[in-house]
Image (cartoon, rainbow, N blue to C red):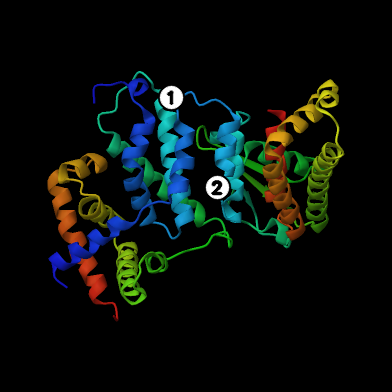
Amino acid sequence: MDKTLSEMNFTDIYDKYLGKIYRFVFLKVDSREIAQDLASETFTRTFEYFKRNADKKIDNIQAFLFRTASNIVTDYYRQKSRTNVPLEFVTKTIADRAASAYERPDLSLMRGEQMSLIQSALHKMDSRHADVVVWHFIEDLSVTEIAEITGRPEGTIRVMLHRGLKELRNILSSHPS
Amino acid sequence: MNEQELIKQLKTLKNISPDKEWVNFTRSQFIPGKAAGTRSIFDIFMFAVPRPAAVIVMVGVVVVAGAMNMQSAGVLEFEVGTSPALTASLKHVSGETAEEVAEIQEIVARKLVTQYANTANEGSVNTVVFNKDAEERENFQALLKERIETKIARFNDLFAQLESGESVLEILANPRRYEQNFKVIAGELGSQIKDLLEQAEQALAEGDLITALDLVNAIEKLIEG
């Protein structure tokens, strides 16, 4: 990117990447409300960085956002281990949300359950493998882009993708259903 | 399940998307040059937000009103005590509310240990650790409750005066800026402020003192402008 941070329109960045960041965070935490909080925090921190470093340039905004989101989720789990989770937060599984969105309850329940199983399996995986699987297969990021986010060589990313899929299949195949 | 089927199932997770109202609300923070304005406040209050999100909406409102920096909104954290009102929970409250709670605790007992983990640009985390003395905890609750009740009573009095039919000229002639502001703003946002006041009263009745304090502080910030 040739523009400095002060020249970039942050709302354009928000519009372009919010969906990806939200999805990434949602698949790592256990409630929609918490995902909203953490995704919002990701953009707030990035916005603050922009304000403090207006003359700088960022080569890869996407990588910056994903790294920030990843750090924020890590901080969340670290804090969560020290505090009680608020009871008033409603935790909705993907199954619940999917079931309410579709017209055919029987079909929606099946789809919702499948999605819920996959989310659950992603949680059980090595988080580094889960991240690369999500980035590549759900967010359609290339190996090069993922390498930029993680700072790892492309060859390593390919290996992690292969291992991640294998791990996911093993977890899903061991599920009773 | 083979790899192709697994990848196909993974791609169904692309359907996960955030709530549109939340997207628009969050986006409004980043619109350049968006000054405090009645229209923005109305936009926010148009959302039908569930009660757990009410505090987050309030912080958003005072950001638009230009009274508070949302980045200073802190996470208030209490150790689990025997008091249900102060059960440890993660709440997003304004920096002002966090400071006011800290002030109340200092009034109550010199022995209380307060730890501030104040990281630049990450908000502040205030931890109130009560000594085993139950009386300190009771005093803290009582003072907090008194503070909230005083503020709620004041708003209710001002509403009563407004409803008694004082003319605009009389209002503007009132030298006390706070009351003057209240009446002007209540005229525009009366139903919304009343909703917030009701929520504050409900939170107080349920013993959720931090939420109640945060709500009344947000109303104050709206009035002070």
Residue position marked by numbered label 1 in the rendering: A51
Q: Amino acid at mark 1?
A: Lys
Question: Percent x, y for residue A46?
Answer: 40, 34
Residue position marked by numbered label 2 in the rendering: B47
Quarter of the rendering occupied by the N terminus of chain A: top left
Q: Quadrant of residue B51?
A: bottom right
Question: Percent x, y for residue A6?
Answer: 37, 21
Under circle 2, the secondary element is loop
Instruction: Calculate the distance from the C-alpha at mark 2 to the C-alpha at mark 1.
Output: 29 Å
Q: Tell which tag, 2 or 1, sits nearer the viewer.
A: 2
Which numbered dot is residue A138?
none
Extreme-top residue of the structure = A55
Q: Residue at image x 77%, y 42%?
A: B104
Q: Does residue B49 appear left or right of residue A129 in this picture?
A: right
Question: Percent x, y for residue A91?
Answer: 48, 63
Q: Residue at image x 49%, y 41%?
A: B25
State the residue in front, B111 or B34.
Answer: B34
